[in-house]
Structures are given as structure tokens and as C-alpha cells.
Image: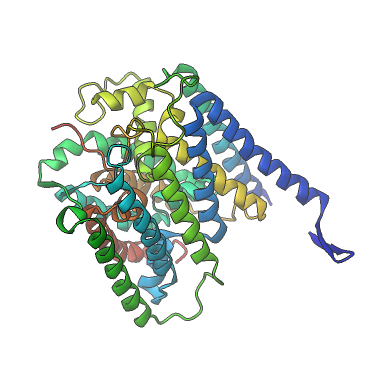
Amino acid sequence: MAAIEGGVRTLAPARLSRRVLLVAVVVAGWLLATWFAGLRQGLLFLIGVGLGGALAAVAFGFTTGWRVWIRQRDPTGLLAQFLAISLAMVVSIPLIAAHPQELTGAVGPLSVSLVIGAFVFGAAMQVTDGCGSGTLYKAGLGNVISIAVLPGFIAGSFLGAAHLDWWLKLGNLGPMTVQQFVGTTPAVLLQLAVFAVLAILAWRARKQLHTRWRGPGIFVAAIVLALFAIGNLVVAGQPWGIVYGLGLWGAKVASALGYDLSTNAYWGRAPQLAQIAAPLIDDVTSITNLGLLLGSLVVAAWRGEAFPPVSPTVTQWAVSIVTGLVLGYGARLAFGCNIGAYFSGISTGSLHGWVWFACAFAGSVVGVRLRERLGFKS
Amino acid sequence: MATSQRRTTFAATFWALLVLLVLADWWRGAPLHNRFDEPLPWALGSGSSSAAKGAHCTAAPRT
């Protein structure tokens, strides 16, 4: 409990020592990541902690943001997402254009698999109330549903990547960026204009005046997310991603169980085989994921909100586990989740990010109804 | 109270398993680079894109 002593706000010793312990855990994690995987991985771990902390601090849900728009016409979550992506974009696209040898964008192919995968992912993320980042940060802070989703998500990501070559044969135009058609600066301006139009439309159609997000916190978190996402690009050389790391964890499990992945079109590529053989803390996506998990736990524990009271029924447990598989599989077909495709794809100019957004949003409209039918909290 | 305790135990088990798996994975893994001979801590300005060799969600399979 906070107390006022002589005009100075003080913290009770128990809370103070808990907070010191939490800071110590983060510092220890950073030191371990740096010692065992190097300075770059240590920095990426800290970036992950920051991302997880920002997400958990205000319950920055991509899934929830869409759902409250679909159900209540509350535009707050959508507007915060547009702000975060736009801020990341105005730095990322010019930076990649100026340093093409060092930085790469999240540019995925336009394919039939993208349309199907994004739609399915959008529906599934509403059922489990968690996208890529949402599932990770909620699992980190101890939400039992998200923890139940995670193993399926990992298995689905692994399998989806393993089957990706077959799905691409259904139709594939290859990767495309907005900037390859109109140039760097016009691409930034064009995408900003699209977000502005979408924001105005969302605002004008609003019905809900009492949003679940109080105050400016969600917009501050959006700015923080954008800054950490830019940091991820600068340090890792590639934009923020989540699902690749989860699939890699699945590939490591499959490999440890004796499966030969060398003949697979995806996991059999030389860089993937090297990643599978290497410690996962050497992988830029995995180390950020681990930091994200820890960051959300630390922030939730700091605020006394860790291990939230969620008591799923048996059916909801089963649905969560199965839906995790669908989430992972869909995200790999779609070349990313809400982070790898929507956030990082659009913020680096990939057209697949926009297609992902449209298809996943359509899937979410279906998913919101499914969620209500299955008795999950709306 | 019992439900709350089960929930906390479940989440604590998840964290313990995660830490154990990361440790076991590190123990049996073959590092991609010598951590005592590191490239620059950040890719920007390093002159190469060694950190981003297909290890992203947007990476496609070989065709």
C-alpha cells in the first residue's frame, strides 16, 4: 500500500521489495541473454521486455480492439493500433530504403494461403481472445487460457510452415511493397492517408462512448510499442515478429523427437536447419518472445495483476487448445500474425500486411459470434 | 481460494517448464556464432544483414 509520510509518497516494504525483485529478474535475464548469446541478443531480450510490458500495462489487445469495434463500435483500440503502426512506419520504411544491405522489411507474398490463413487466424484469435502478441503477453502474466493456447500455437506454427510450399502452389503473386510502385516517400504518405481515412471512418461510426481503456494510457502504449518495434528493426535487422519463433520451438521439439526435417521445403533450408540446431536464444524472434513473456509478467506483478482470475470450463479448455493449433497454422499460411504481417508488414510497406488486415478483420467478425456461442466472456 | 491456488500453480509450472526447456535447449544447441567474437550489437551500421537470414514470419519455403 502507498502511504503519505511527511508529504512524501512511500511504498510499503513488502511491495518495495517485490518491485526490487522484479527489476532484478529483468536485469538477470538481460545479463544471462547477453552472456550466453551475445550483446545483440541481450538488447533484443530487453526490447521484448519493453514490448511485453507495454502490452500488459494497458491490456493493449489487437484482438480486443477489433472486437469492441465489431460489437460496440468503440474505435479506441483500432485508433491506437493505427497510431502505433503509423509511427513505426514513418521511421521504418525510409530506414530500410537507406540501408537495404543491413535492414529488411516484413514482406510476404500475396497468395491464396495469405487470404485463407488470415481469415482463419482472425476468427480463431477472437475465440481465444488472443492474437500472436496477445497470447504471448497473457501467457506470460499467467492467464491460464493463453497458457493452454500456447502449445497448440507452437505446433500449428511448425506444421503450417512445414506445409507452406503446398499452400503456395494454390496461387502466389510473390512479395510486393507499396514503395516498389510509388517510391519511398509517397509510400509513407499514401499509407498514412489510408490510416487517416480509416481512423476518420471508425471515429465517425462510433457508438460506444465509455471505452474500456481509461485515459491516454493506450495511446502512450502505442507510442512505446512503435519505439520498441523500431528498436527491434535497428538491432535485429528485421521487423518485430512472433510466429516464426513459435514455429521454430515446434521444429526443435520435432527434431528432438527424431523427425528428419532436412527434406522439408521450409524447415530443410540451410538457415532453418542451422537455427534448429542452435540454441533458441540465438534466434532473434525467440529471444524477443522470451523477453515479451517476462516483460508482461513483471509489469503485471508490479501492478498486482498477475495470475488473473480466469476459470474456464472443460469445453473452453478443449476449445482453447484446438484453437491454438488453428491460430498457429493460420498465421504461418498468412506469413505472420497481427505482429509479423499486420504491424510489421504494413509498417515496412508490404502489401501482404494490408491484405492480412482485411481478411483477418473479416474472420474476426465471424470469430466474435463463434466466441459468444462457445460461452467465452464477450 | 483453492481455484486461485490451482491457477497460480498452473502458471508457475508453465514458467518453470519454460525456463527448464530454454536451459536444456541451450545445453544441447550448437551456437550460430562465437559470443566472444560478436558482430556489432545492432544490425544498422553493421554492413551486413547477418541477423536476418530467413528467420521471420514472412520467410517463404524453397520452391
State the image coordinates of residue B13 (x, y, percent, origin top left): 58, 36
Please tell me which residue is depicted at 42% across the width and 44% down the height of the picture.
Answer: A232
Q: Looking at the image, is A285 positioned above or below residue A178?
A: above
The type of colouring in the image is: rainbow
Q: Position of residue A327 (x, y in %)?
A: 33, 48
Residue drawn at x 44%, y 31% is: B40
The image shows residue A91, relative to residue B36, as above or below, that is below
Q: Residue furthest right?
A: A6
Against B9, is B25 above or below?
above
* Quadrant of the image containing the C terminus of chain A: bottom left
- Please state which of residues B44 and A324 is positioned toward the viewer in this rendering: B44
Q: Nearer the viewer, residue A246 or A199?
A: A199
Q: Quadrant of the N terminus of chain A?
A: bottom right
Residue A87 vertical position relative to residue A168 in the rendered view, above or below: below
Residue at x-position 40% and y-position 82%: A207
Q: Where does the image place residue A170, in percent across and percent down from the top left?
A: 10, 45
Left or right for A208, reference A213:
left
Residue A223 appears anywhere in the view: yes
Res. A311 visible in picture: no
Q: Nearer the viewer, residue A316 or A52?
A: A52
Horizontal side, residue A254 vs residue A281: left or right? left
> Could you say where residue A6 lies in the image, as x and y percent from the top left?
90, 64
Q: Is residue A53 left or right of residue A61?
A: right
How many marks the image carries: the answer is 0
Query: Considering depth in this image, is A172 or A39 the residue closer to the camera?
Result: A39
